Amino acid sequence: MNDLPFDVSPTLLIALPGLRLYALCAVLLVIKMIAVGIYTGVVRSRLKVATNPEDAARFGAQLADTEPPEVARVLRAHRNDLENIPAFLILGLVAVLLGAPSLALKVALIVFTAARVGHSIAYLRSMQPWRSISFGFGMLSMLTVMVLILIRVFA
Amino acid sequence: MNDLPFDVSPTLLIALPGLRLYALCAVLLVIKMIAVGIYTGVVRSRLKVATNPEDAARFGAQLADTEPPEVARVLRAHRNDLENIPAFLILGLVAVLLGAPSLALKVALIVFTAARVGHSIAYLRSMQPWRSISFGFGMLSMLTVMVLILIRVFA
Amino acid sequence: MNDLPFDVSPTLLIALPGLRLYALCAVLLVIKMIAVGIYTGVVRSRLKVATNPEDAARFGAQLADTEPPEVARVLRAHRNDLENIPAFLILGLVAVLLGAPSLALKVALIVFTAARVGHSIAYLRSMQPWRSISFGFGMLSMLTVMVLILIRVFA
């Protein structure tokens, strides 16, 4: 195997175009996703409901067989994150590693991050058509990254 | 820090064995996952039900307290994707980055992608034992990638 | 484009500090997540319930409109994994690729992996406050990795 004749520097890849911006967006998106998760707990404790008997006992909350609508809404917003954010982050990293055209990739990263923040706010505040619009911008960014990947794959 | 004495090319990694095929499979799998997500909306609008009051008002749909069985089925298919596809894509990328044996990795990527497409079709059409069989092939591919990773880690 | 004057070795990146440990933790975490998924099926078959009519027919199980509490608990444990593990694995890989300080990263990888195994056990056995404590250690590890990433991004 033609091993390289030098040690790999820990900073070998940091200069890959878009990697720093990607990393920043990944941190922001995961923080946003965690915030929605924490908000589930906030809404539950405000309504004094718990899903697990051991939590109901511990916090003196009422055990809810089905989630109250306010909690179910936050869970849906969170699930929509799970359906979109990990997939986008994987594709975004692949695009960076493939050396995808840097400007288009950076725009897609920024638009996706902003769109998903907007989506969470719009979902939790029941704001339509803003929820659908922000979802659409997120999806457009995802499709852009896919096209950038396919350009590199078939280049 | 022993920085390399040259700039990193954006195309440094594109020649990593398996990276292009991995990228192609990642795009296909995410498109498939998004298709299942969109299909949820299609089924809801066909049944004229909505989960959010603001959507019920906007589309003149009925607000569903619990999801109709047709919608619940699509949600389960989608959730099964969420349980398997991001995990596989992360492991697959790690295997590529570790320089895992290329042929076995490529077979695992192709089998997983085909199996998950089959799984969605079988789930949405209630086709057993095909749903279980395609799930099993997906799982086998995932285990193969794990073994390939462990071989490199302990090499 | 300033392409490198040599072929990329498949083992170019294996010497990146932390990559091997990261890969090992990724495999362990995905195995753990799959185990929780399989356990859902075990609990369903023990209770002789099924969620899909075609499964109920096949296994002679009762079709459950709503999940029994035992199954719902496993699903919640699994969902908590989905909310945390893929996000952590993406951030962990980004930290490795950015050449994050190796020791802190390795500690975060080990603590997260142990914490998430503990979380699953504590969730399935209804053990509080251990479930919350292990969740908290997982979250702390995730925040550590975020800080390590931000240090490299803004270095």
Image: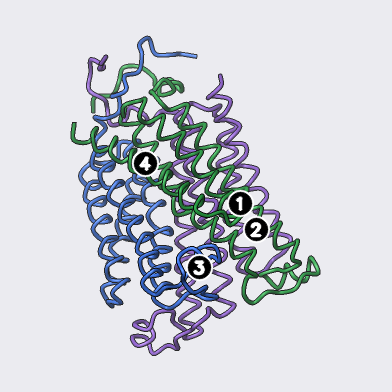
Chain colours: A green, B blue, C purple
Give the amino acid type for the residue marked by disc 1 in the picture. Answer: Val
Q: Residue A139, labelled with which disc? A: none
Left/right of residue C27 with respect to residue C137 in the rendered view = left
CB contact under 8 Å: marks 3 and 1? no
The residue drawn where x is 36% and y is 13% is B7
Nearest to N terminus: mark 4 or mark 1: 1
Q: Position of residue C84 (x, y in %)?
A: 55, 51
Residue at the spot of label 4: A91
Circle 3 packing at 10 Å, graded few (<14), some (14-19), many (20+), is some
Which image quadrant for residue B52? bottom right
Q: Residue A40, labelled with which disc? A: 2
CB contact under 8 Å: marks 1 and 2? yes
Image position of B124 with respect to A126: above or below = below
- The N terminus of chain C, quarter of image: top left
CB contact under 8 Å: marks 4 and 2? no
Give the amino acid type for the residue marked by disc 4 in the picture. Answer: Leu
Residue at the spot of label 1: A36
- The C terminus of chain C, quarter of image: top right
> Do marks 4 and 2 share a chain?
yes
Residue at the spot of label 3: B56
